[in-house]
Image: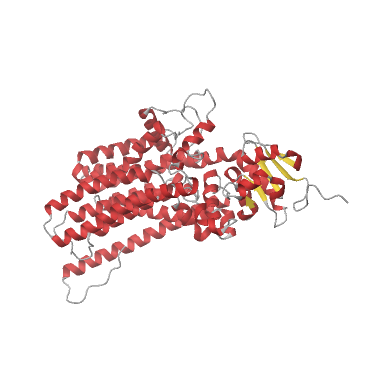
Amino acid sequence: MSRLSRPSSPASAAERLAWERRYAQQRKDALLTLILGGISIAALLWYYAHQQILLYGDAVAHINIARRVLDNRSWLSSFFQLGTVWLPLPHILMLPFVWNKVLWMSGIAGAVASMAAYVLGALGIFRLVSARAPRSAAYLACGIYALNPNLLYMQTTAMNEPLYLAFFIWAIVYFDEWLRGTSKQRDDEPGSRPPERALEGCGIALAGGAATRYDGWFFGAIMGVLVLGAFVRWWRKTPDAGRRRAMAKSLAEFLLLNALVPVFWLAYNHRVSGRAMDWANGPYSAKAIAERTTARGAAPYPGKDHFVTAGLYFVKAAKLNVGAGHWGDLLFALAAAGTAIAIWRFGRYWIWLLLWIPLLFYALSIAYGSVPIFIPTWWPFSYYNVRYGLELLPVFAVFTALSVAFLAELASRPRKQAVVWSVLALIVAASYLSCYANVPITLKEAQVNARGRTILEEALARFLVGLPPATTLLMYQGEYVGALQQAGIPLRHAISEVNHPDWEWALLDPARQADIIIACKGDPVWMSAKEHHEELTELFAITVPGQTKCVIYRPTQPRGESKNPPKQ
């Protein structure tokens, strides 16, 4: 928000009144920001106290990807420790915090960016709605977004959904401001800024989203087409050469930012793995994971190669993220009614329809991109990627508020309008309470999928804590890196698949390269240990239901001693 300065004494009464209104609104916005920050911190304290911010295996992986940029066996390879599948921005934003051992081990290092994104996303919802609807509707939409139980949990973790939502929302906010700015004949009104600044802001937000999730690539392509179309129309009706030059410069920056992230990521993948499309079809891609985890002869997951079914599963996941049972259906009905109103009053509200783009992206991803969603109420009655439904939370927030604002508009008397707003507030409160009564589904998903993994990691961590500080480990970090995090073992002490060529040498001769070998069934270390079993001594094995068996070895002959000592 821009800083306001009081107008000088010659200012007209109208200017003073406009300044006072802007100043009062800024104070309200500051108070709203403080409230949102307080809610975010309170949620973090609650879930941290209950040891729930590291339940997601992906959250543990995100934090440790960031950690290994700073904590690895060779500082020359730090830049290439960001991986090739997950996009890099969330890990880069963790770097100022993850170096601290306490913040790393606790998981708080991964929550900071998510918490900031939560606050910014809620403010973006308020700003988007207040530009075209009454402020009462804007506050309601902000409340629906900010108080959602599943978002409140996710913003305490290292998961990247809250961060992407903030970029997604603000890209639409800036696009809306740019369109409204270009529709004006003059842009030198008091307190206003040139519309090209909004276009640049849209480009920055799109680049941030594209560096956070692949949803952002899809959304950025759509926005690029929309911006180019709007620019051509504006150019034809604007004769001012100075404004044309300024806007053309901002458009070039917008397009460059929109293309920069995908180009960089393709080049980065090619440099690290030798394959530019490693994120899409490499061994750690969604496609490869789906192939490994699907039993031979098993039925395809729901929505596979079926666009409509895929869309229905995504919508159902979105409903479960806002309410249990029929409460989610009710909020979806209100959002659908608000969408119908936006289509009816297309000229005023069409920009908000962009909030539905995640439905198209995820329907395509589920149907044709090997990205399944399993929900507990439909076959196969399980939990997997249910959190993706949060991507439609802005739809529930904005269009539910719009439908109620429309009903309040029809009620001519203030008392009837108050009743309408109160009824909706009660519906939202009941829906969110139903989430807590049944455990927020994103938390439930994390709990269900973390049971075996956390038990195994805790057992490994108890062993690792007792090792001498200089112990060199050989282990595959793709599965149970959380054990190192819990034990506080520096990642540079572990030879893993991200350390080249140490990893290859260690697999060829584990007894000579490591003091402790941790082999989990099916991983490369397991295969190496089987090939060199005569040189290794098994210390103990860890077996947890639903998890692969892990065996801890040490070299039969201590490192540094010759296998064939000279004869006396």
- Residue situated in front as seen by the camera: 382 or 405: 382
Would residue 361 be found to the left or right of residue 193 on screen?
right
Q: Is residue 561 left or right of residue 126?
A: right
**Which one is in front, 194 or 557?**
557
Q: Quadrant of residue 4?
A: bottom left
On the image, the x and y values in percent for residue 418 come to 29, 47
Residue extending furthest right? 568
Which residue is the extreme one toward the bottom?
Answer: 9
User: From the viewer's perspective, is residue 567 above or below residue 296?
Assistant: below
Which residue appears at 47% of the width and 56% of the height? 92
Q: Quadrant of residue 517?
A: top right
Where residue 349 sits: x, y (%)? 23, 45
Q: Quadrant for residue 448, please give it.
A: top right
Whether 80 is drawn above or below 429: the answer is: below
- Measured from the top left, where is residue 481 in percent x and y? 60, 47
Q: Nearer the viewer, residue 41 or 485?
A: 485
Residue at 24% of width from left, 58% of height from top? 249
Q: Is residue 283 above or below residue 97?
A: above
Query: Which residue is rendered at x = 24% and y = 45% of the image?
Result: 226
**Please, which colouring scheme is shown?**
secondary structure
Q: Quick check: can you spot residue 212?
A: no
